């Protein structure tokens, strides 16, 4: 009972911050790493009950540069919901965000379930329908991004929104570990990286997620979108910014952050 009270306390703190658009204190004062995914699941279940639909997962903390930025030492994952998705070139409403940052990532769309392991790069590649360039718009409900592993996992891996590019490439056409990425804000190059910066290979990240999802009893399914993790450092953005990521072999993906009304 005590553990459930702690999970609910942390979940309510994060949900309130998201609803009221006011950042909150870290939740590591009430939970540890072992309870973090339970907090995440609690708030995802509430959003699903309110009408959102799960459409995939995002893998976080895959790039050494991002782990150094946040002071954590292992990957994590969050759940993608249909109300988090935007199309290439869309205007992103800043009123849904608190302290956003952007990352360039390889996205995979699955054509088969990944329900029985063990998994490696070859087995997960066989389940991929195609890859796309993507922008992940990460955000933290926790003040000043003052997060540990428990904080970010509980906060749905610090996820917010995502944008998929229009080019869809089968893995016979592109090798994810060999891609390179350039992320620009308002025409200025702000972050660079490569597929090899994502756990050595974005398919390695996908294999890690597949194993973890099976272990937790909620395996990846055909049709899921998987954001495989950042190819370079996160970049802060604000209202009015125009963001573009170009990933070799996968094309370009863009988004504009709406100016807030006076």
Image (cartoon, grey):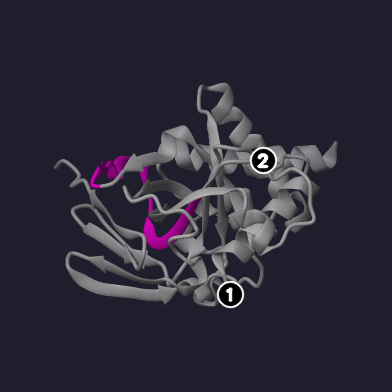
Question: Is the residue marked by circle 2 packed among few (<14), some (14-19), or many (20+) residues within 10 Å?
Answer: some
Q: Quadrant of residue 11?
A: top right
Q: On the image, numbered disc 2 is attached to which residue?
A: 113
| SS assignment at label 2 | loop
Whether residue 67 is visible to the viewer of this picture, yes or no, is yes
Q: Which residue is rendered at x = 60% and y = 56% of the image?
A: 125
Mark 2–mark 1 distance (CA, rounded to whole Å): 23 Å
Please state the horizontal and vertical placement of residue 252, each as a whole percent of the image: 28, 59
Q: Is 34 above or below relative to 44?
A: below
User: Magenta region: which residues?
Assistant: 89-108
Residue 106 drawn in magenta: yes
Whether residue 27 is visible to the viewer of this picture, yes or no, is no
Q: Is 103 above or below relative to 214?
A: below
| SS assignment at label 1 | loop
Q: Which residue is rendered at x = 60% and y = 38% of the image?
A: 222
Please state the horizontal and vertical placement of residue 179, each as a whole percent of the image: 42, 71
Q: Is 248 above or below relative to 170?
A: below
Q: Quadrant of residue 242?
A: bottom left
Describe residue 122's horizontal placement relative to residue 2 as left or right. Answer: left
Quarter of the figure that contains the N terminus? top right
Please state the horizontal and vertical placement of residue 201, each as a whole percent of the image: 57, 70
Q: Which residue is rendered at x = 56% and y = 72% of the image?
A: 67
Q: On the image, numbered disc 1 is attached to which residue?
A: 200
Q: Nearer the viewer, residue 240 or 55?
A: 55
Q: Which dot, 2 or 1, sits closer to the camera?
A: 2
Give the numbered dot on residue 242. Answer: none
Question: Is the residue marked by circle 1 packed among few (<14), some (14-19), or many (20+) residues within 10 Å?
Answer: some
Q: Nearer the viewer, residue 186 or 10?
A: 186
């Amino acid at each position: 009972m005590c553990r459930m009270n702690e999970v609910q306390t942390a979940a309510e703190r994060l949900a309130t911050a998201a609803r009221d658009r006011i950042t909150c204190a870290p939740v590591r004062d009430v939970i540890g790493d072992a309870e973090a995914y339970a907090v995440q699941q609690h708030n995802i279940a509430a959003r699903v009950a309110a009408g959102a639909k799960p459409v995939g997962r995002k893998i976080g903390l895959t790039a050494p540069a991002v782990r150094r930025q946040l002071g954590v030492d292992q990957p994590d994952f969050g759940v993608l919901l249909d109300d988090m998705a935007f199309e290439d070139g869309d205007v992103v409403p800043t009123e849904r965000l608190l302290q956003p940052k952007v990352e360039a990532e390889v996205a995979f769309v699955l054509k088969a379930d990944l329900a029985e392991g063990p998994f490696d790069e070859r087995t997960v590649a066989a389940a991929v329908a195609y890859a796309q360039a993507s922008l992940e718009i990460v955000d933290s409900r926790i003040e000043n991004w003052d997060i540990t592993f428990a904080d970010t996992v509980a906060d749905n891996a610090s996820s917010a929104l995502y944008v998929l590019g229009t080019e869809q490439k089968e893995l016979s056409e592109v090798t994810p570990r060999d891609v390179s990425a350039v992320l620009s804000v308002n025409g200025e190059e702000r972050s660079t990286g490569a597929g090899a910066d994502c756990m050595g290979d974005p398919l390695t990240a996908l294999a890690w997620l597949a194993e973890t999802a099976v272990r937790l009893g909620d395996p990846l399914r055909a049709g899921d979108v998987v954001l495989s993790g950042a190819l370079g450092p996160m970049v802060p953005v604000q209202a009015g910014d125009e963001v573009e990521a170009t990933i070799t072999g996968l094309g370009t993906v863009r988004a504009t952050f709406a100016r807030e009304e006076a």
